[in-house]
Image (tube, helix red, strand yellow):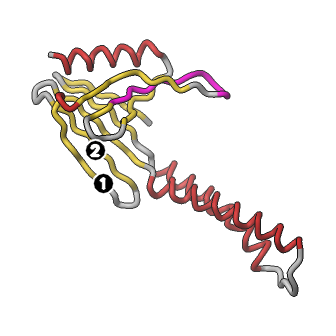
Amino acid sequence: MDTIREASGRIEFSSEMPLAARLLILAAGLVPLLAPYELLIKPTWQEFSLIWLFALVISAGAIATGLLAICVAVFGMSQHIRFDAASRGLTYSFKTAGGRHGEKEYPFSDIERLRVRTHHWTDGPATYNLALKLRATREIEFGRFVVQGDAERYLSVLTGMIGE
């Protein structure tokens, strides 16, 4: 869930992965792990056959799918980006349920590019994020918008704040 807070020269964008979502993803990641048990461990295989090879392939796919979901639940990031006009800087912080966290402060002069990034989806309308490129870092996306005008409004507010 994304939230935007504005107060006296500060704008903060927060993206949180709620505990309920993490637990649901974790539970969904455990379900595919039943396949290897049912196909490889529970039966008593007496000899090698093509059916055993098929069961092995299905089990490998199930393990990969399960581990991916478990990693998303444990290592999915929550992030906060705060623009502060008074200090002429921004603070980027992140944390994961797995314990990884960090916080860095950057002056506005480190901002190379700030833009609206459009994501086109095959099964729904386009969404819009703000994308921030800082010197010597990867591009950071934040602020999920369903209306392009809202994203462009925040882009112009932030551009004005940075350019002051």
Instruction: Give the Cα separation between the discs numbered 1 and 2.
Output: 7 Å
Task: Tell me the quarter of the picture where residue 2 sits.
Answer: top left
Q: Give yes or no for residue 52 being in the magenta stretch.
A: no
State the residue lying farthest toward the front.
136
Q: Which mark is residue 72?
A: none
Q: Which residue is mark 2?
A: 93
In the orientation shown, which residue stands out farthest toward the bottom? 46
> Which quadrant of the figure has residue 121?
top right
Q: Is residue 4 above or below residue 158?
A: below
Residue 133 position within the rendered picture, expressed as x and y whole percent measured from the top left: 32, 32
Secondary structure under badge 2?
strand
Give the mark nearer the N terminus: 1 vs 2. 2
**In screen coordinates, is 101 left or right of 122?**
left
Pick the front one: 16 or 43: 43
Q: Quadrant of the C terminus?
A: top left
Report the residue at 13% width, 27% height from top: 88
Q: Is residue 36 above or below residue 21?
A: below
Q: Which residues make up the magenta segment?
A: 122-132
Which residue lies under the disc numbered 1?
101
Q: Position of residue 68 (x, y in %)?
A: 57, 57
Q: Are the residues at dot 1 and dot 2 in contact (C-beta closer than 8 Å)?
A: yes
Going by the image, does 88 lie left or right of 75?
left
List x then y, in percent, for residue 98. 40, 60
Amino acid type at circle 1 is His
